[in-house]
Image: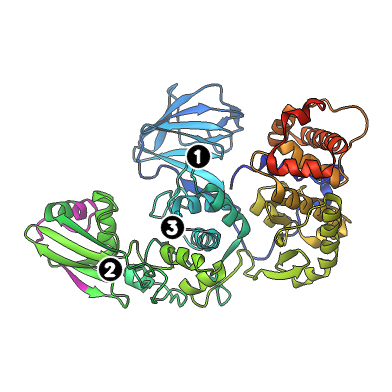
Amino acid sequence: MKAHLRAVCRFIVMAALVVRAVLLAPGQSPPGHSAATLRVGLWTLWHDKRIAVSPGSSATVRLCEGCAPAPMAGGTEVRADANRLELADGRRVDSIWLSGSVTLAAHGENLTIRNPVRISACSGELVLAVTLPVEGYVERVVASESGEADSLESLKALAIVVRSFALHGAHGHGDYDLCDSTHCQLLHWGGSARAPAAHAATLSTAGETLWFQGQRAQAWFHQNCGGRTASPREVWPAKAAGNKAMPWLVSRADSYCTANGAREWSANVSLADVTSALSAAGLARPGWKTLTVSRRGESGRAVTLMVGSAEMSAEDFRVAVGRALGWGKILSTWFEITAQGDHFLFHGRGSGHGVGLCQAGSAAMAAAGRDATQILAQYFPGAVTGDEASGRAWQTLRGQGFVLETLDAADGAYLAQLTQALGEAATRSGLQPAAAITVRAFPSTPAFRNATLAPGWVGAFTEGNWIATQPLSTLSSRKMLRSILRHEFLHALVESEAAAGTPLWLREGLVEMWGGDAHSGGSPPTLKIDEIDGALDHAAGEPQSQSAHRAAGWYAQRLLERYGRGQVLEWLHTGLPASALAGLK
């Protein structure tokens, strides 16, 4: 998930929340195990042998697992030497651990990483592993794997599948949990135009995975099923043979995928190129001449091929050709093969392995008005979404102007307080929700923190029309529930009115003032108006954040006193003119 420093700072509800952090100390962990972080292989397809490391802000380095971190004074080069590392100054170590902001440069690419990185070596190649929060990993993959046809509901379905895949099984790597290539799930480390939409989908499904009859359910996705999905045993027969049945992953027709016509493709590949690809993958020695489909699965896909006199998995064949000749050659295993001299003509349909969620069909379902639950029911029949740690399903309780999502039906007892909090927010601001505001109450402080990346002393978190809270019972027992939710409802109401580019200090200041949290009396704050946004976005700690929030509230109240609520709300829509600020600076 994106850096939430601004969000964490802006949702410090009141001084009491900050000073009395012990009141919101972490609660009991939910039943079951739920990982908070994942180790993700970086640049796993490049096989780099050397890399340049340049320190950014607060960069530290450790040269052994038990060593204390030391500030990085300058850049260095790290080189793989067999199974050890050699640094620019000649020192040899087994691994190095980097934290803070560091820039890595290799194979002509530069990447700035702000998550912990471990660098080691294996057989003369560097092994890089980045530790990411689970939700940060999911968001990056959804941004990388989604397309322009996707909308919120298809992205939510994808986020749940991505999370289920990541957490519900081993993926064959020794130095990290998942790689960043399509062997696991594609992850682009740079920015993406899909990032905002991926962020919204990930946040609104935080912690949700697929379950089947009380057991965690493995899940996969692919680009286009061609009109019918595949079962795992069609694509990975060797793996499926030793595994128990997965009744939620069956081959079934998908009319949504083909609503605009089935995706068909053709490829002409030379015998020499296929021979080279299979030889490089260790699947077949040179010398074979014939290539035919020997067995098909229930979906019509090729399961095994005869390469000369040797039988091999059709999916292994597809992957070997893809790695050697490019992934645009053999798009799926649903193909026919025709020999043409020293070439083979492939004609097929679909793209990807065909197991699980079809992204083309999912996008079409969302466009037709289906929600994420209906999408997942199409591709994983019998499976349901549930909390990753416990398997419990999220329940939706409806209030006036909001919906409460909770794992505990007993939270219905708090609907009256939430209704009162929203009513107070609307009365104080003069704003009404244009659509129902979603409040998701997490079952524990760790679950709340993992979903939002907020520290434990923050009682709630708001983004757009979505509010996350620590357990309602915890907030209620501390007599904070109504005041915290009033504050968060104010954020949702103000953000729904604010145009892009509206100063952060104005949005924060109005919430502070209407929430009763602003310290508006006395002399002007030391922070100037043009300094507040930076302080809110990049507060070095709680005191600076509190100071920035007070300053925002002070200036917002001056603005309201001078021009009136109606005019200030209009400026939320249209932008704040420089003339309005002249008398406040």
Rendering quarter of residue 567: top right
Q: Nearer the viewer, mark 1 or mark 2?
A: 2
The answer to whether marks 1 and 2 mark residues whose Cβ atoms lie closer than 8 Å is no
Q: CA distance from mark 1 to mark 2?
A: 40 Å
Say if 378 sits above or below 60 in the image: below
Circle 3 sits in a helix, a strand or a loop, which is it? loop
Asked if the magenta segment contains residue 286, the reply would be yes
Circle 1 sits in a helix, a strand or a loop, which is it? strand
Residue type at the position of mark 1: Arg
- Please tell me which of labels 3 and 1 falls first in the chain: 1
Q: Position of residue 139 (x, y in %)?
A: 54, 51
**What residue lies at 41% left-to-right and 56% top-to-bottom?**
172
Circle 2 sits in a helix, a strand or a loop, which is it? loop
Task: Read off the residue under disc 1.
Answer: 118
Q: Nearer the viewer, residue 262 or 576?
A: 576
Residue type at the position of mark 2: Trp
Task: Read off the residue under disc 3.
Answer: 171
Say if 435 sits above or below 533 in the image: below
Is residue 25 visible to the viewer in this orientation of the structure?
Answer: no
